[in-house]
Image: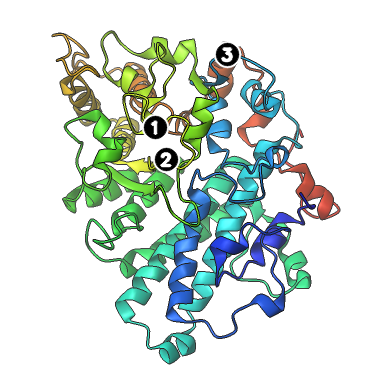
Amino acid sequence: MKPIYIYIITAALVVSAGCQKELDKDPIGLITPDQINATPTVNTITTTVDGSYQMLSSTLNLIGNWAWPEGTVIRPDFVIQDMASDDMQKKWAPDGDQPWMDEVSGFRFTANNAAFNGIWSFDYEGIAVTNQAISYLTNNELISSLSMNESLRNRCLGEAYFLRAFYYFDLVNNFGDVALVLKPLENFNEAYKVAIRVPATQVREQISADLAAAKPLLPAAKYSSNTERWRVSKGAVTALQAKIALYNKNWQEVISLVNELEASGFYSLNAHYFDNFSVAEEFTEDEVIFAYDHQSGKLPARGNGLSALLDWGFVAPTAGFINEFESNDPRLLYTVNSATKTVNKLLGSTNGTYKGNDDAPGNKIYIRFADVLLWKAEAYLETSNYPAAIAIINQIRQRARTTPAIDGSAVPAGTLPARNATSTNKDEIKGWLMHERRVELGFEGQRFHDLKRWGIAKQVLTAAGKNFQDKNYLYPIPQGEIDKTAGVITQNPGY
C-alpha cells in the first residue's frame, strides 16, 4: 500500500461526489481538483450523505486492500473496546495471527499499533465525508439552484450533523484532544493549519452543537424514512445526547433526555432478547435506536465482514465473561455459544448461519433501548433515587428471564430473580447495575468505556491479568500522525 499521508489531512480532503468509489483509492481520501464535481446535483448530495455512514460499518477493505498493518481491513472498534476489556479475547485458540490485537488486549502496545491508526482512519474518513455533505447542504445558493426539496434537505443535514458528532464522540473518548476539522479542505496548506489537537472540551462542545442542530431537522417519527429505516432518526439524536450527558455525569440531563425518548412512544424492550440481533427482525423490532444497516449482494459491498473473521477463529469470550452470567440466564447463549464456537449476537443468527460470509446482512448495533434505560438507572442511582434505579434493573432482568432459552424452552423458575427493591445500599445497587450492563450488553462495545468512566479500569483489568496503566485511560495518538506532522500533532502523556 502507498504511504498514508497525514490522516486528518487526507481524510479532510475527501470530496465525495462518488465517495464509495473514492474510498478505495491510494492515498486514502485524496482526490485531485479535476476529479471534483464542480456542479453537484441532488443525487450528488444524497450520495454524499449516504456515504457518510460507511465508515461505521464492518464491511471489509473499505480503506485499502487487506491492509492489516494499518488496522484498516475492518473497523477495529471491537479490538479497542471489547478485546481491551475483560470480556473478549482475540481467538478461541491463541495463535500468532495479528499480534497487534493481542498487544491491545494485554495493554502491551505502543503508539505504532495498527488498531489506533485504524480507528483514527475510519473516524476521520467519516468526518471528511460528513463535512462535504454539510458544506453542500448549508449552501443556500446551491440548494436553491437545484430546487432541492426542503424536507429532504433538512433530513439529510440532520443525518450529517449527527454522524459528524458520532465520529467525534468516538475519537474524543479514545484519544482525548484531537484535531477539529469542520469543513472540506481545498489544499494541503489548509490541511496543515488544522492538523493540530484542540482540547477535548472544545470537541465535546462541537459534538453537542452538532446534535442540537440535527435534532429539529429530523422528523418526529420513529424512522426518518419509512423506506430506508437505517437512517439517523430524531430518537438517535436524543439518545446520543443522553449518552454524552452520562459520560459528563450530568445526571439530571440524562434522566430528562431518556424521559423525552420514552415519551415519544417509539421504543420499548423487545419481548425476546435476541430480536435485537436477529437478521429476520431488523427494522421491525422495537428496541434498536441506531445501527449500521449491513446488506448482502450490494455494489459497492455493504455486508458485515466481521462474520468472516468469526469463521477464522477471531472473537471469543473470556472465562470471566462467561462466569459473570447467572445460572440459566438465556442471554449467555444468545451472545456466545462456546460449544459451537459461534458468536450469535454478532452473526444475527443462532445456528451459525452467516459464519464465514464476508457479505453477511447482520446489522452493527450502536444504540439500543436497554442500554439507554440502564443509563437512566445509573443517573437515578447517582441522584439517590434508589427505588427508580432498582426498578429499571429489574425491568431488564424480567425481559431476560421471560425470553425463552436458545432451544425454545422456558427458562427454569427462579432464574434471574428480582433485586431487592427496598435496598438503600448504593454500593450494592451499583454492583447490580455493573453486572447487568456487562451481561446485557456483552460484545456490543460498551464494557471498556464503562470501566473507564466508572474509574475502575485499572482495578478490574489488572485483576484480569492485563497490564493496564493509568495512561491507558486514553489511547496513544497514532505515531504515524505525529511523525507526518513533525510533531505538530502531539502525543498523549506516557506514550
Q: Is residue 390 above or below residue 341?
A: below
The residue that label 2 is drawn on is 360
Q: Which numbered disc flags the more N-terminal residue, 1 or 3?
A: 3
The residue that label 3 is drawn on is 93
Q: Which numbered disc flags the more N-terminal residue, 1 or 2?
A: 1
Q: Position of residue 179 (x, y in %)?
A: 66, 57
Mark 2 is surrounded, within 10 Å at the Cα level, by few (under 14), some (14 to 19) or many (20 or more) other residues, namely: many
Give the secondary structure at mark 1.
Answer: helix
Q: Residue placed farthest to the right in the image?
A: 486
Circles 1 and 3: CB atoms closer than 8 Å: no
Q: Position of residue 85 (x, y in %)?
A: 53, 24
The answer to which image quadrant residue 183 occupies is: bottom right
The answer to which image quadrant residue 275 occupies is: top left
Q: Is residue 274 above or below residue 481?
A: above
Whole-number angstrom distance, CA of label 2 to CA of label 3: 24 Å
- Can I make out residue 288 in this image? yes
The residue that label 1 is drawn on is 347
Q: Residue placed farthest to the front in the image?
A: 297
Whole-number angstrom distance, CA of label 1 to CA of label 2: 8 Å
Q: Amino acid at mark 3?
A: Ala
Q: Which numbered disc flags the more N-terminal residue, 2 or 3?
A: 3
Q: Is residue 121 above or below residue 443?
A: below
Please name the residue shown 46% across and 66% down the image: 49
